[in-house]
Image (cartoon, rainbow, N blue to C red):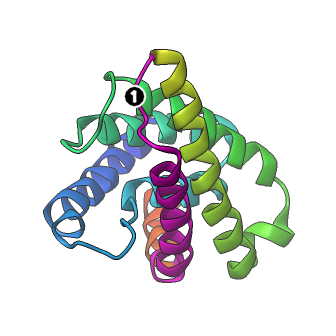
Amino acid sequence: MWRREVGLSTLTFAGLFLVQEGLINQFRLPLGGFSLILLAALIWSSINEPEIAAVTGFIAGLFLDLSPSTDGPFGHWTLVMVISCFAISYLGYGDDAVNSNPIGLIIMTSSAVVATLVLYLFIGLLFGINLGGFRNVVQALLSFGVWSALVAPVVVPFIARAHSIVYAGNR
């Protein structure tokens, strides 16, 4: 990935970080909420090659680690996002039935959000992080999945457009 694409991708995720922390986290949504950066990174990765998706996961993971609401060691989200973004890209790479179908993309990314959170919990257990009660963990997983499925149809066109602007002329 070239410097231009990395720089523009970083600026895109920096803007999403500011929207997440300055606007979305200020609302108290029922059952919890959603992570715009997590959702956007998985959508961005699902329409990219696996190598570029890993870099995207690294950038998004750094911003998730910088979030004041993040519990755990610095680099935890970065590790999880590199793995998740690479995996969603690898599984969807070359499958135009999923990537060209908005419903398939929404279902795939909403499922990947829950899988990413499960991976975050598993790696958090390895790091010795206190996760809380079982009921709270299940409620958080379900709420992130539901909110991601509700927000993804709104976010997908913006992320696809930003992706096409960043990679204009390179594909």
Does residue 1 show up? no
Q: Nearer the viewer, residue 21 or 50?
A: 21
56 up-or-down from 154: above or below = above
Residue 7 showing in the rendered view = yes
Left or right: 141 in relation to 65: right
- 18 in relation to 154, above or below: above
Please state the horizontal and vertical placement of residue 164, each as a whole percent of the image. 51, 66
Asked if residue 82 lies left or right of residue 38, the reply is right
Report the magenta residues as a range. 128-156
Rendered image quadrant of residue 26: bottom left
Q: Tell me: residue 10, above or below residue 167.
A: above
Please tell me which residue is depicted at 33% across the width and 42% down the height of the picture.
64
Q: How many marks?
A: 1
**Circle 1 — which element?**
loop
Residue at 24% of width from left, 68% of height from top? 24
Q: Position of residue 131 (x, y in %)?
A: 43, 35
- Pointer 1 residue: 130
Q: Quadrant of the C terminus?
A: bottom right
Depth check: give the residue in front, 96 or 152.
Answer: 152
In the shown orientation, is residue 161 left or right of residue 18? right
Horizontal and vertical percent position of residue 67: 23, 43
What residue sits 19% from the left and 57% below the top? Answer: 21
Q: Amino acid at mark 1?
A: Asn
> Where residue 57 sits in the image (x, y, percent)?
50, 39
Farthest top residue in view: 127
Q: Is residue 156 above or below residue 79?
A: below
Q: Is residue 137 magenta?
A: yes
Q: Main secondary structure of the magenta part?
A: helix
